[in-house]
Image (cartoon, rainbow, N blue to C red):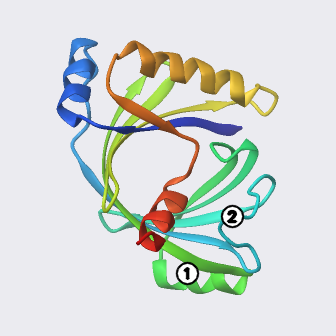
Amino acid sequence: MREVEVKYQVQDTEALLVALKARDIELSAPVTQDDQAYAPVGWSYGDGKLGVSFVRLRTVDGQHTFTLKRPAENALSCDEYETAVADRDQMHSAILAMGFRATVRIVKVRRTAALPDLELCVDEVAGLGTFLELERMVSDDAPGEAVQAELAAFVASLEIDATRTDETYDSLVRAALTSP
């Protein structure tokens, strides 16, 4: 299975919430996600991502999750593997021992809605603003870019002021941290 997503920076959060409510889309209670991103030693921002494994260590309400994503067609169409972790510090050390290095920390407040064929996320990302992310799990042979086009059409139908980005949160945070 692969995770395929689209991501949009939203200019007016209230307009987004109104558009979702008009569709009877109810968001979950907000949860804070504390993510540490990792990249392979030797990989640098600006290098290609296709076929490269990246990992994340996430904590939500004291529960930890390890995720590996490997971009297949583009940075937002990835093979994904995920599992619960008992000890964040030990997992951090193991990730470093596997040849990864810590890159950026991403803290966001996420509200979600599960729709029949996708998960919708509204994220308030520290230092970046509000984002709308749509995700769908697809079989390995499904064309990710076609799925992304379907997800983008759903966002367009909301008629909100939002700008699509093909970047991951870690790349966006990194860019914000390094810009003057």
Residue 137 visible within the image: yes
Residue 116 against residue 73 in the figure, above or below? above
Mark 2: few/some/many CA within 10 Å (<14, 14-19, 20+): few
Q: In x, y percent, where is residue 63? A: 38, 65
Residue 93 against residue 140 in the figure, above or below? below
Residue 44: quarter of image: bottom right
Residue 64 visible within the image: no
Residue at image position (78%, 52%) is: 50
Quadrant the N terminus occupies? top right
Residue at image position (21%, 42%) is: 29
Secondary structure beneath label 1: helix
Residue 4: quarter of image: top right
Residue at image position (76%, 26%) is: 143
Residue of label 1: 92
Secondary structure beneath label 2: loop
- Amino acid marked by disc 2: Gly
Q: In x, y percent, where is residue 78? A: 69, 45
In the image: residue 63, left or right of residue 83: left
Q: Residue 5 or 178: which is nearer the viewer?
A: 178
**What label sits on residue 46 in the rendered view?**
2
Q: In x, y percent, where is residue 139? A: 74, 30
Q: Residue 18 or 162: which is nearer the viewer?
A: 162
Q: Residue 137 or 16: which is nearer the viewer?
A: 16
Of the residues under marks 2 and 1, which one precedes in the sequence? 2
- Amino acid marked by disc 1: His
Residue 180 against residue 146 in the figure, above or below? below
Residue at image position (45%, 69%) is: 179
